[in-house]
Each structure stands twice: as structure tokens, then as C-alpha cells.
Image (cartoon, rainbow, N blue to C red):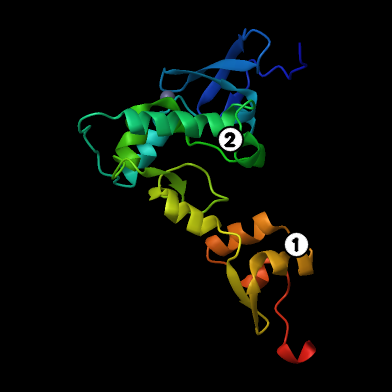
Amino acid sequence: MGRFVDLSGKRFGRLVVLHRVANKGKITRWRSVCDCGGEKTCQASALTTGATQSCGCLGKENARRLGLAKRKYQGSVDKERHARGNMIKRCYDQSSRNYHNYGGRGITVCDSWLASFRAFYEDVGPAPGREYTLDRICTDGNYEPGNVKWSTQDEQRHNMRRNRLVTFRGITQALNLWCRELGVSYKQAIHRLNCGCTPEIAFGLPEIELKDI
Ligand SMILES: [Zn+2]
């Protein structure tokens, strides 16, 4: 039995924790009641990190406010259901093969997508084809409206490819070489570059005058 902090009676956003849910030696989960009257069961970390602040009503209200178009189901949604399931596993199931790259790095899934497949589908829409998988636009960002798109494996590989060339201080060379030379994290650098940061910021270095080098 792992130790846990008693969250009973505590408030997290719209949720007030009712009680701990027995979970056969696995991760402790908590049952909460929402201000809207709904209920929610989730891990302590989802509450304490602010990832989950409602039964799902908050995310739905936000989506509505942002004017995200409702999308109707068209035919089979197996692929989309599968994609949502895998996304949740990567972020919350510590036994998941890729957990260390997602949940382990603090990546979360927004409230409304955790709460319902319908909300997820309405925001993300149908996969354009069989070869598409769910991808985040900023890879340091969470799974939430605005940061997710359907990509082909090729597009994802292109995003992640290790021989990406970066021009920095007048020299162009592969990103992995830069990271080795500068002693910075490759993962961090590529995430920042993918988000549109300059090489200086991606490498965590101050901008310096060319004459200094
Ligand atoms: Zn609610």
C-alpha cells in the first residue's frame, strides 16, 4: 500500500473531493462532486496539478465559448476512440510504454476530453484517413483544443527527425551536434524549435554579438 495525502473535503476548481476509491493496489483515485452536480473520479495528481478542475463541464463551457464547431459522428469512430484511449494511456497510465515521454513529463489531457469521447471528437474531428494519428502542435503542450492535429507518420517523423539542420551563430549543422557541443538537452531544444523559438532560446543561451565568438 503506497502512502497518500488525504484529499477528502479539499476543493480543486469546481470539484470537492468526497472520498478515496479502492483500486486494487493500483494508483489511488479520488471521487469528487462538481459544482454543477456531476461527479468525477481521477488521480490525485490530476487534481493537484490543476489538470482536472471539473467533471468535464468546464472544458465543455470553454469549448463553447471558443466557438469550436460541433462535429457530428460520420460512420465509424473506432479510429478516433482508439486515438483518445492511447492519448489518455500515454498521459496517465504509468505502465504505458510511452508514459515517460508524456505523463512522466507532465503532459496532461484536458478535462473535457478526459471526461467524454464526444467532447474529444467534437474538438478534434474525424481522422482524415487511416494513416493519420493524433499529434500535438507544440510537443511541450498538453492535449487540449488548439494543440492537437491529425498527422501522418511521415509528418510526425519529419517533426522529430534527428538530423534537423539548425543555423546558429552563423554555422549550420545538425541539431544533435549542436546539443552535444553546447551540452544542452536535445529533447528540450527540438521541442522549443518546433514551437517556433529561435536557436538561442531553444538552447537556453543569451543572444550574443557575432564579434564575441
Ligand atoms: Zn461539472
State whether residue 98 is above or below residue 19: below
Q: What residue type is disc 2 on?
A: Gly
Q: Which residue is mark 2?
A: 50
The image shows residue 37, relative to residue 113, as above or below, that is above
Q: Which residue is identified by label 1?
A: 184
| Mark 1 / mark 2, whichever is N-terminal | 2
Label 1 packing within 10 angstroms: few (<14), some (14-19), many (20+)? some
Q: Nearer the viewer, residue 24 or 151?
A: 151
From the top left corner, tell me how far across and down residue 81 is, in percent: 37, 29
Q: Quadrant of the C terminus?
A: bottom right
Asked if 98 appears above or below 161 in the picture, the reply is above
For label 2, the SS is loop
User: Would residue 17 be found to the left or right of residue 66 on screen?
Assistant: right
Ligand 1 picture quarter: top left
Q: Quadrant of residue 42?
A: top right
Image point (65%, 67%), residue name: 175
